[in-house]
Image (cartoon, rainbow, N blue to C red):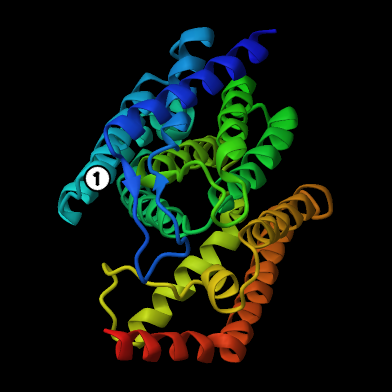
Amino acid sequence: MTYIIIFALLFVAELFYFRVADKCNIIDKPNERSSHSTIVLRGGGIIFLLALWIWSAFFGFMYPWFLLGVTLIAGVSFWDDVRSLPDSVRLVAQFIAMGMMFYELIIDSGELIITAWWMWPLIVLGALIVCVGATNVINFMDGINGITAGYALAVLVPLLLVNASEGFIDESYLIVAILGVLVFCFFNFRPKGKAKCFAGDVGSISIAFIMLFAIGKLIVQTGDVTYLIFLLVYGVDGVLTICHRIMLHENLGEAHRKHAYQLMANELKIGHVKVSLFYMALQFVVSLGFIYLCPDTIFAHWMYLLGALLLLAVAYVLFKRKYYYLHEEYLRQLKIKN
């Protein structure tokens, strides 16, 4: 009954936000780099932050520093959705918010700190850089209807399954996060031109923090960093696309349409829902295989991770080699048009 009430509150909150966004003209206008062709309300992903606050109100403020960090970065990201902010401001806010999240993880793992205190400065610095990078990759991957919500489910559901045996985080945290995603799915997981809203930076950044905190709790408790495999599909597409753009000497801060999913949706004309379901299903297969088929040893986990990474990377490169010429033709036509 509690979860039904929370779901209803989130649904009403999303509808209320739509009225505010419509009145305040918080919209996303398409341009030549967009994968959509109609004006859509932006910032619907604020529901992910609201889900955390509602969860805290119902179940107690278990992770206060994390909650403050998410609220900070979500607020900055929402303002960036409304009125563009400099990259430096957003990056500083992300590091501060991530620092708060790490502090939450550290104070929940006192035994590990005592036994390896001298390694923590390096560990925290490296993890901080990786997590801020992962947050931005998740943000970059938010480009078509349903992909952010679908992928979030493909991460949160396996985490919920692992939590049943590991007990690394309060179960209600994951359930309420999933409820927030389902509410967003109702308005966004739709064919091209049918979405009521987009997540915006506030949504993609918030859900990134929600997922990374849960994975961080799992890694801290088990000492096994291979659980990052729950983000592998996004990681391969995001990182290899960045590498590709570096090879092309492009400005990484400029908008683009070079991700594999964008090539599928734009040049190959595959429907948004189909592409999002493909990414969702692919991550589910990788994660469930890791949970149920891979032996529960560090060596087996690393072999599985490296094997999956290699297969996905090869598939990405072969896909780009076969179809990237279509994007080059699009860029030539765009140049002629302008």
Q: Secondary structure at mark 1?
A: helix
Q: Amino acid at mark 1?
A: Asp
- Tally of numbered tags: 1
Taking depth in this image into account, of 144 and 41 the one nearest to the observer is 41
Residue 235, position as x, y percentages in the image: 52, 62
Residue 62, position as x, y percentages in the image: 46, 16
Look at the image and tell me in which quarter the C terminus lies.
Answer: bottom left
For the question of whether residue 46 can be seen, the reply is: yes
Residue 4, position as x, y percentages in the image: 67, 14
Look at the image and tell me in which quarter the N terminus lies.
Answer: top right
Residue located farthest toward the right when viewing the structure as drawn:
293
Taking depth in this image into account, of 202 and 225 the one nearest to the observer is 202
Q: Answer with left or right where residue 307 lies relative to residue 187.
A: right
**In the rendered image of this protein, does residue 180 appear above or below residue 27?**
above
Residue name at image x 54 percent, y 60 percent: 234
Q: Residues within 10 Å of mark 1 (few under 14, many from 20)?
A: some
Residue 134, position as x, y percentages in the image: 43, 55
Q: Answer with left or right where residue 81 lies relative to residue 142.
A: left
Residue name at image x 19 percent, y 55 percent: 87
Q: Answer with left or right where residue 205 lies relative to residue 235.
A: left
For the question of whether residue 95 can be seen, the reply is: no
Residue name at image x 52 percent, y 35 percent: 217
**In the rendered image of this protein, does residue 261 appear above or below residue 200?**
below
Q: Say which residue label 1 marks.
A: 80
Residue name at image x 48 percent, y 26 percent: 14
**In the rendered image of this protein, does residue 234 appear above or below residue 98?**
below
